[in-house]
Amino acid sequence: MDETPNAQLLMHDAASLCGVALLRAASRAEGHLEPIIGTQMDRDRLLEDLRSALDVVWPDRPPDVTDLEAFLREAYRRFVSRADALAGEDGFVPAARWREQARDLLLEHLQAEIEALVGGVRTEGFWHSFGAVSDIEQLGELVAAGMLIKLRSVGAFLVLPPSRYEDELTAAAFFSAGKWDQARDEAIAERIARNQKLTHKQIAHLTLTRPLPEETSVYRASTYLYLVQDVLTLLEQFTAAVDPRLLPDRWPEWLGGVRPRLLE
């Protein structure tokens, strides 16, 4: 277990397995909560599945486990403590500290943003035509602003450093320090970063550096295809470089189908 991410994921999986084993059934037996463990779980298989992680954090553990619940609670404490200690080691990957379900949910949100952008590009001819009818002209402005906000959201994931917020991950957090910068196309990353600033000051916030209201359309892209292609390229590079254990199983197949739909 030479690599820190391997150690992180080993501790994470072992702690999760302990958590599942310590669940209690939602029924009472003689006035007490009846544990699932010991009655509906293969104890020997459970301990064997935990053995590799236990050898790291508790090599002098008792050979015979008489009180499984107490043993698992102590093992869980040791797994979590070891995972916390890994935060200071070389090669630490912040995203590997998150629960798998939480990482998957965040990437599901990212997937939804990409799908919205693809849909926006595929229907550009439709919503650009809104300007020809005065009653719906502003709908075109709303869609254009929405496209830029979505690009800002995806761009933030792709080019910003690890977030200081506990409920947010960026692409950089899926790698050890500096590795994502090395894996991505820097020219594309710089273009995305510039667009981040423009959208921040011209769309997301009311500032004096916005274009004049009557000149807004002059500064808008005639098509958002190339902006979406840039974020998609970096997302493809992210997927190729990241440890696949940090991605949902469905992710590569989904991403592989995005560009063909965007360009068809």
Image (spheres, helix red, strand yellow):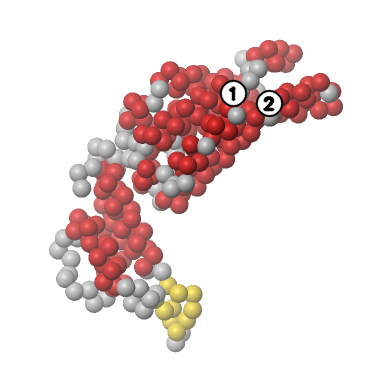
Left-right relation of 167 to 82 = right
Q: Would you say residue 142 is visible in this rendering?
A: yes
Q: Residue at x 44, y 87 (%)?
A: 30
Mark 1: few/some/many CA within 10 Å (<14, 14-19, 20+): some
Residue 136 coordinates in the image, percent (x, y)? 81, 28
Quadrant in the picture for residue 77? bottom left
Residue 149 visible? The answer is no
Q: Position of residue 99 (x, y in %)?
A: 41, 51
- Please, is residue 16 above or below residue 174 in the view? below
Name the foreground residue: 263 vs 192. Answer: 263
N-terminal-most mark, 2 or 1: 2
Q: Quadrant of residue 62?
A: bottom left
Q: Which residue lies furthest to the left in this view?
A: 60
**Closer-to-camera residue (197/146):** 146
| Location of residue 172 with respect to 191 vertically, above or below | below
Q: Quadrant of the C terminus?
A: top right
Residue at disc 1, secondary structure: helix
Count numbered badges in the picture.
Answer: 2
Q: Identify which residue is drawn at 24% across, 65% down.
A: 48
Horizontal side of residue 159 vs 84, given as left or right: right
Q: In this view, does 248 lie to the left or right of 136?
A: left
Residue 154: give x, y in percent of width and height.
Answer: 52, 32
Determine contact: label 2, label 1, CB under 8 Å.
yes
Instruction: Report which residue position mark 1 lands on.
Output: 225
Q: Which amino acid type is shown beneath numbered disc 1?
A: Leu
Which residue in the structure is indicated by mark 2?
A: 124
Q: What residue type is labelled 2?
A: Glu
Q: Which residue sits at x=58%, y=33%?
A: 261
Label 2 SS: helix
CA gap, disc 2 and disc 1: 9 Å
